[in-house]
Every structure is written in C-alpha cells, then in structure tokens.
Image: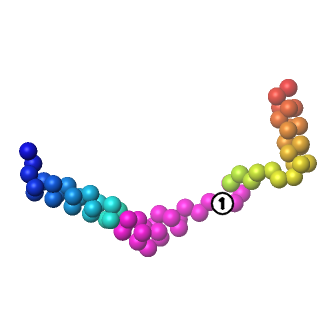
Amino acid sequence: MGGPNLELFKFGVYIFFPVAVMYYVGSPSFYEKHVKETKVRAEKTHHPLTTRQDIMAELEKLQAKKK
C-alpha cells in the first residue's frame, strides 16, 4: 500500500519526534520560562501534622465542627 518510502518516513517520525521533544524540554530556556517561574509559596502548601498533640487538637476541632 504505502511502500518503503512511507515506512522510512514513519520510522523517521518515530525517532525524530521523541528526540526533538526531549531536546526542547531539556533546554535551559524551557527551564527558565516554565519551571523557574512556578515557585510555590511555603505558606500555601499543606504541612502534615507531626506531633500527637497537634493531631488530637485537629481531631477535636473536626468533631466539634461535625456536631
């Protein structure tokens, strides 16, 4: 149907496309533009409770809110 030229073209696309994407994503300009600008503020992130007293206080708050 397509012949060897079509198969060569498909093989070239299968090889070239992932290499081109890795080259683009791995470039320093991509990092500067997309990764460096997305800094997350520490106060907006979730900090899990670590001490038993903090966990018990949070459970009491949730139980009081539920009632």
The magenta stretch is 22-44
Seen from this angle, which residue lies furthest bottom? 28
Looking at the rendered structure, the kind of residue marked 1 is Arg
SS of the residue under disc 1: loop
Q: Quadrant of the C terminus?
A: top right
**How dense is the environment of label 1, judged by Cα within 10 Å: few (below 14), some, or many (20 and up)?**
few
User: Quadrant location of residue 57?
Assistant: top right
Residue depicted at x 89% and y 48%:
52
Question: Would residue 4 be found to the left or right of residue 55 on screen?
Answer: left
Return the residue nearer the eye: 54 or 42: 54
| Position in image of residue 35 (x %, y %) | 51, 64
Residue depicted at x 41% and y 71%:
27
Residue depicted at x 8% and y 51%:
3
Q: Taking 62 as reference, is 39 above or below it? A: below
Seen from this angle, which residue lies furthest right? 53
Q: Is residue 2 magenta?
A: no
Q: Is residue 39 magenta?
A: yes
Q: Taking 55 as reference, is 67 above or below it? A: above
| Position in image of residue 38 (x %, y %) | 55, 61
Name the residue that disc number 1 marks.
41
